[in-house]
Amino acid sequence: MLQVLANDFKRQWQDTESAVLSAVTAVGTSGWYILGKEVEEFERALAAFWGAPEAVGVASGLDAIELSLRAAGCKAGDKVLTTPLSAFATTLAIIKIGAIPVFVDCDDFGLVDLQEATCAFQSRPDIRTFVPVHLYGQPLDLNRLAELRDAFDLLIVEDCAQSIGAYFEGRPSGSVGLFAATSFYPTKNLGALGDGGAVLTSSDQGAATIRKLRDYGQSAKYSHTMIGYNSRLDEFHAAILRRVYLPRLPHWTERRRAIANLYRDGIANPNIRPMPIAAGSSSCYHLFPVIVENGEKESFVAHMRQCGIGVAEHYPLAIIDQPALAGVPHEILGDCAHARRICRLEVSLPIHPYLTDDEIVRVMAACNSWQ
Ligand SMILES: *Cc1c(COP(=O)(O)O)cnc(C)c1O
């Protein structure tokens, strides 16, 4: 039986091949492959799209978070509040600079619980850095996030790897923190044909620091004023992203939202509950998570695969339960029962913009025929 894929990169390639090849030719013939005008132009286009004053291209989403923390002055031994439910990279960025991740539980939307975060900042003046994640494409409540920032004078790096094009009450995710980090990993809503990432910020000085950090800490050629990284977005990806994928992103996001609406209307199985969306939030539907209410996740996943549906899990294990974390300093506030419950019960349905109407119907029929 034909598979309904979680991501259909071959269809994307069929649709965009000639435009991508033109972008590649333009860079190839320019003879300039690292930190040239394609990266500059992409940064301008991305900043304009996002409504942010500055964007800086880097090598990955992980690096975007790590460099942001560094540029914000976060250092070894600092405590950083974050969520146990995310890609491991969120926590990895904190650990890589020697800072100490402190985990609080998430809420019913799978997002870091801002009430619990408030309690943590109230009782723990030693925690003044926060890395929240706009998970699944759902923005956190940005008004509350801004209130927290101001009440506790927080340094915030927003993980926007899954939230490009997501808004809360008209305001884009990433607009509250000093920095926002995003990723162009191929599965993301704005995915490259390889790795890439970017930092968004309204701070000129912050952007300048990220530009130094990504290029060995150079402030001018052969003048190294910081201990930096090699974390440069290359000209090929910048050209492909700006010329081909970024212009298509609004349409792709609309398609994701339309699919989500069809799913919400069409999934009638009481044991399959789409993850709710908070009032005021406009998700960019990076993922479409559902909760398997009767607890039989393995059986549902097996059924969907039997029906040819490429489902996934985000995430099968909470970050706090990952073996790699056992060996590094960290703190867990409370029991993180919500995060662990979502890990036990969550399944992601296909929601990429190249799904056909027939495939959407098949996904819903497969959900509704499971018992
Ligand atoms: C993908 C992702 C990252 C890491 O991005 P990479 O480009 O793979 O390094 C970080 N955080 C979240 C929430 C992600 O989904």
Image (cartoon, rainbow, N blue to C red):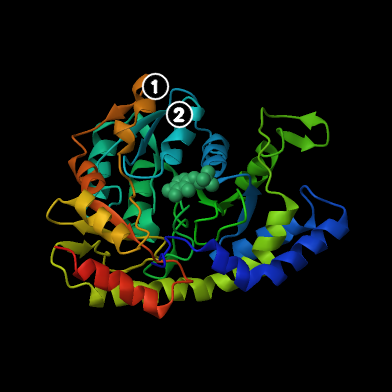
Across and down, in percent, residue 261 comes to 31, 76
Q: Is residue 51 visible?
A: no
Is 302 on the left-hand or right-hand side of 259? Answer: left
Query: In the displayed image of the protein, which residue is found farthest to the bottom?
Result: 357
Across and down, in percent, residue 10 comes to 56, 64
Give the quadrant of residue 307.
bottom left
Viewer-closest of 124 and 278: 278
Is 207 on the left-hand or right-hand side of 239? Answer: left
Mark seen at residue 95:
2
Residue drawn at x 32%, y 31% is: 125
Across and down, in percent, residue 186 comes to 55, 55
CB within 8 Å, label 1 to label 2: yes
Q: Quadrant of the C terminus?
A: bottom left
Across and down, in percent, residue 156 comes to 44, 44
Q: In the picture shown, does residue 156 fall above or below 76?
A: below
Residue drawn at x 41%, y 44% is: 87
Is 146 on the left-hand or right-hand side of 50? Answer: left
Residue drawn at x 52%, y 73% is: 250
Q: Residues within 10 Å of mark 1 (few under 14, many from 20)?
A: few
Q: CA separation, marks 1 and 2? A: 8 Å
Q: In the picture shown, does residue 70 fall above or below 338?
A: above
Q: Is disc 2's CB within 8 Å of ligand 1?
A: no
Numbered disc 1: secondary structure: loop
The first of marks 1 and 2 along the sequence is: 2
Viewer-closest of 122 and 117: 117
Q: In the picture shown, does residue 54 fall above or below 210?
A: below
Numbered disc 2: secondary structure: helix
Check disc 1 and report the residue beneath it. Answer: 328
Mark seen at residue 141:
none
Q: What amino acid is at disc 2?
A: Ile
Is 333 on the left-hand or right-hand side of 91? Answer: left
Give the quadrant of residue 338.
top left
